[in-house]
Amino acid sequence: MSVSLRVGVVGAAGWLGGAIANSILDAGIVRSENLSLSYRSAKPERFPGAFWTRDNQELAARSDVVIMSVRPQDWDVVSIDAKQKLIISVMAGIRISALRQRHKTERIVRALPNAAAEVLMSYTPWIASKAVEECDRNIVRAIFGACGIQDEVKSERDIDYLTGFSGTGPAFHPCWHRP
């Protein structure tokens, strides 16, 4: 994996977006100067050297890969033209078809890590749209491998099932299990 990869995390001030950003930095998947992060209210004091913004379109313009990590109920106000970039969504319940239409890209991955990502022990099932190529899949494997274990599944229905089976954010607290 090239550390020249430019990654943007929409919602990086939240616990999951922050956990993913921290994991990919620690794993060397991205360098801090190639990491763009957005926040909604107060700018966090973490990830020195990373680019922080409130403008999600600016984040997308600076990124090769955009990770959407906002609450599903807040997604309706996030308007990004991804210009055919790879979008990785970690939002529960938002389908690939809706992501494709809203963000103007065919390269969509839907993934659902759990809160154990904070301690690098998440199980992350994911599915890719037909336009996602093997090089994109390698990026997805690296990102979620840095958070724990990842697994490409065959259908969006599998994502919903496996998320319920492995536990979601409220079902796991990182202090309960330390590596």
Image (spheres, rainbow, N blue to C red):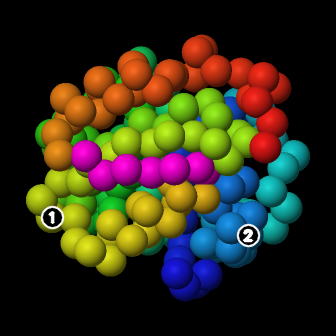
Q: Is residue 151 magenta?
A: yes
Residue sitting at x 78%, y 23%: 176
Q: In this rendering, is residue 137 above or below 69?
A: below
Is residue 126 among the parts visible in the rendering? yes
Q: Residues within 10 Å of mark 1 (few under 14, many from 20)?
A: some
Which of the marked residues, 1 or 2, is nearer the chain's N terminus?
2
Task: Give residue 9's position: percent from left, percent from top.
Answer: 56, 51
In this view of the protein, which residue sits in the foreground, 117 or 85? Answer: 117
> Whole-percent x and y of residue 42?
77, 34
| Residue ID for mark 2 | 32
- Residue type at mark 2 is Ser
Question: In which quadrant will I find the C terminus?
Answer: top right
- Residue 61 lies, in percent from the top left, at 45, 66
Residue 28: image quadrant is bottom right
Q: What is the secondary structure assignment of the residue under circle 2?
A: helix
> Residue 84's image quarter?
bottom left
Instruction: Give the residues drawn in magenta, as a range.
Output: 147-153
Q: Where is residue 70 shown, x and y percent of the image?
A: 50, 32
The outermost residue toward the top is 170
Of residues 171 and 10, the one nearer the viewer is 171
Q: Is residue 105 left or right of residue 140?
A: left
Q: With 135 as the anchor, is 130 left or right in this view? A: left
Query: In this figure, which residue is indicated by the disc labeled 1?
Result: 131
